[in-house]
Amino acid sequence: VRQLIAARGLEDGEQALGRNRGVAARMTRAAREEMDASEPVLDHVSDGGVKERIASRLARMEVHAGRRIAKGTGLLATIGSTAPFVGLFGTVWGIMNSFIGISKAQTTNLAIVAPGIAEALLATAIGLVAAIPAVVIYNFLARAITGYRQQLADASAAIERLASRDLDMRRAQRQPAQRGAASFVKVG
């Protein structure tokens, strides 16, 4: 993004990124391609259309890259949110087995209660062992993905500024020639 901010125009930004295959480089190339495709009509229409098309392409590229990077985080979120309930279900099942053992044996002997309690504790532990790392990893990835999406948005904004600057420079270069031609017409 720093290279794009320091660039003077789209071509300069594209050269600064070099042969980079990253999303920002692809976005810069896409903006330049849109400028090139619009070249024949730029002198006859306002700049708004090309700016709109560039913004649209960049927005779609941002969304696609963000979706691609976030793939799989839903599974982590599901594990993190459901694993404690699976553990809780196992806990209830183990305690229920303990009560069944008590009712069958008609005693509260530790040997009767212990297997069910052990099952309950094991189920709880398994649920927590699955949930805690999933939640920690999900939160880490969510923060990283948010940062990545912000970088893409910054790159997109920088590219839009470069395209706008190129269009302004093009208009400024054309105006002296148009003024000269207009004055020539008036005189002649």
Image (spheres, grey):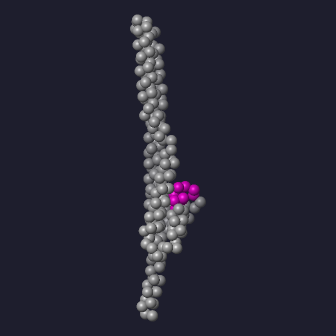
Residue at 46% across, 46% down = 144
> Looking at the rendering, which quadrant does residue 168 occupy?
bottom left
The mark tally for this picture is 0
Instruction: Pick out the residue farthest to the top.
Output: 106
Answer above or below: position of 115 versus 160: above
Residue at 54% across, 62% down = 29
Nearest the viewer among 162 and 86 is 86
Q: Position of residue 58 (x, y in %)?
A: 48, 59
Quarter in which the C terminus is drawn: bottom left
- Within the magenta stretch, is there residue 24? yes
Residue at 41% across, 13% down = 99
Q: Is residue 44 visible?
A: yes
User: Magenta segment, which residues?
Assistant: 20-28
Residue at 45% across, 34% down = 80
Answer above or below: position of 155 versus 35: above
Q: Position of residue 157 (x, y in %)?
A: 44, 60
Q: Position of residue 11 (x, y in %)?
A: 53, 67
Instruction: Pick out the residue farthest to the right.
Output: 19
Nearest the viewer among 110 and 26 is 26
> Looking at the rendering, which quadrant does residue 114 occupy?
top left
- Within the magenta stretch, is there residue 123? no
Most frequent secondary structure within the magenta stretch: helix
Answer above or below: position of 59 versus 72: below
Q: Position of residue 17 (x, y in %)?
A: 55, 61
Q: Is residue 160 visible?
A: no
